[in-house]
Image (spheres, grey):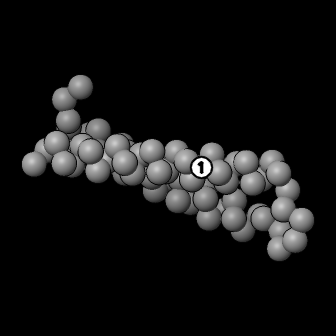
């Protein structure tokens, strides 16, 4: 797949969305007695964010 600015832009856009989702989910976490479903949701968002961050770094490195 050729690297395009569209690809990079779409990854950056999704990462921005994930940042918002992560922050909103963290705000829903109670100070005590963390609810497993909320914690699982947070971990999924963080995992996806990490994957996209690595993909973006690879794309940028391949561009140079």
The answer to whether residue 46 is visible is: yes
Instruction: Locate residue 63: give its quadrant.
Output: top left
Q: Which residue is mark 1?
A: 45
Nearer the observer, 62 or 23:
62
Percent across and percent down for residue 12 are: 37, 51
> Dot 1, crowdedness within 10 Å: few (<14), some or many (≥20)?
many
Q: Residue furthest left?
A: 64
Percent across and percent down for residue 23 are: 62, 64
For the image, the number of numbered tags is: 1
Q: Residue at x 20, y 37 (%)?
A: 4
Nearer the observer, 60 or 8:
60
Q: Residue at x 26, y 40 (%)?
A: 6
Quick check: 57 left or right of 12?
A: left
Percent across and percent down for residue 17 are: 51, 53
Instruction: Please identify the quadrant where the N terminus is shown.
Output: top left
Q: Residue furthest right?
A: 33
Q: Residue furthest bottom?
A: 31
Instruction: Locate residue 25: give its quadrant.
Output: bottom right
**As displayed, is residue 42 above or below residue 32?**
above
Q: Residue at x 52, y 45 (%)?
A: 48
Element under disc 1: helix
The answer to whether residue 13 is visible is: no
Q: Residue at x 83, y 68 (%)?
A: 30
Quick check: 13 left or right of 39?
A: left
């Amino acid at each position: 797949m050729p690297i395009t600015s569209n690809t990079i832009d779409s990854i950056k856009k999704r990462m921005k969305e994930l940042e918002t989702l992560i922050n909103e989910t963290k705000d829903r976490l109670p100070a005590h007695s963390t609810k497993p479903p909320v914690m699982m949701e947070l971990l999924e968002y963080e995992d996806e964010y990490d994957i996209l961050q690595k993909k973006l770094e690879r794309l940028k490195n391949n561009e140079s």
